[in-house]
Amino acid sequence: MNTTATLSRIFAGIQPELDQVDALFQERATSGLSILNSASMHALASPGKRLRTALTVLSGKLNHYDFEKLLQLSVAFEMVHLATLIHDDIIDEASTRRGNPTVNALWGDKIAILLGDYYLAKTSGLIAEIENPRIDRLFADTVATVCEGTILEMMTSGRADLTVETYFEKIKNKTACLIAACAKGGAILSDATDEQVEFLHSYGLNLGIAFQIIDDILDYTEDQTTIGKPAGNDLRQGMVTLPLIYALQETPQNGHQVQVQSLLNSDEHNEKDILDIVDWVTHGYGVTMSMKEAHNYANKAREDLYHFPKSPDRDVLDELIDFVISRRR
């Protein structure tokens, strides 16, 4: 069963809510300016996992359920997520995402930047309508943290000496913090206790870290037909991720560190050298240790979740952990 079908099954119980989020997103993302509207509709057409929407809704269902406020928060988080993807594609000079042309490839960097900014501006109205100071603070802090994570990623690009600690700081800020904010925001809007809010925030953070580690593993272990980009794409872009960091700690390295640094320093990539590194990382210490870390964070997420009474909604959040660990794209 593929990823989309698996998530459709997992989220079957909240499908009506997911549909309403999609509808409100379309409504709020529509612009009267034809070129901006065309770029926006193209960006929205790219299939997503709707993981963040589901986390917001499901976390909100563990206590007092107020879907109207969760609806606005879900759309706001999805808009921020899409804005970051659009801006990432500009930074990475990416021409495709999930096999489809990027906004910057079709309309250029200037329109893509402004479309991302347009989404960020639209979130302000959504958050204001919720009328909750804690959500105001959560949202502002989350967007700022994602920006910090993106800058840290840019600053550490091309460094073969990247440490495990810096790697985790980067993915916590860039990826996991938004996933954590979805769970925390859902908890806040359900009138959860402060302790419950922190448990769900921790659940989302640990889930987000596991999600990104698996993403980085898949970049080495899966091919283009599975993940929509060639294996080793992170390495081509100068990104050093956990599997490579651990592989470089293994001894003996048989000259791989020199080879990796040479690839990171070069603007022209020898495909054979890249695939050689991919094969070395995939079949060695790097992927094994990274998978162990992903499972550790998944277990932490499960421990956070089990502070809540057993319920169908908790079961879905629990199953989501297994999905993140076992997914193939």
Image (cartoon, rainbow, N blue to C red):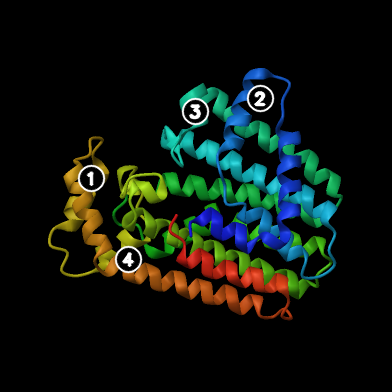
Please name the amino acid that badge 2 sits on. Asn
Q: Nearer the viewer, residue 120 or 232?
A: 232
Classify mark 1: helix, strand or loop: helix
In which quadrant of the rendered view does residue 60 lie?
Answer: bottom right
According to the picture, the residue beneath numbered tag 3 turns out to be: 104
Please tell me whether residue 126 is drawn above or below residue 310 in the rendered image: above
Q: Which residue is mark 2?
A: 37
Tell me the quadrant of the picture where the C terminus can be found: bottom left
What residue appears at the point 44 percent right and 62 percent down from the top-left corner?
213
* Residue 194 image offset from top left, x and y in percent: 78, 71
Q: Which residue is at 18% across, 53% downward? A: 276
Q: Residue pushed farthest top?
A: 34
Q: Nearer the viewer, residue 251 or 278?
A: 278
Residues marked 3 and 2 touching at CB (< 8 Å)? no
Circle nearer the N terminus (3, 2): 2
Q: Residue at x 73, y 76 (%)?
A: 311
Q: CA distance from mark 4 to mark 1?
A: 20 Å
Q: CA distance from mark 3 to mark 1?
A: 26 Å
What's the residue at 66%, 42% (across, down)?
A: 79
Q: Earlier in the sequence, mark 1 or mark 2?
A: 2
Neighbours of disc 3 within 10 Å: few (<14), some (14-19), many (20+): many
Q: Residue 315 versus residue 114: which sits nearer the camera?
A: 315
Q: Earlier in the sequence, mark 3 or mark 4?
A: 3
Percent position of residue 229, x then y:
37, 44
Q: Which residue position holds label 4?
A: 287
Q: Pick whichever of labels 4 and 1 is earlier in the sequence.
A: 1
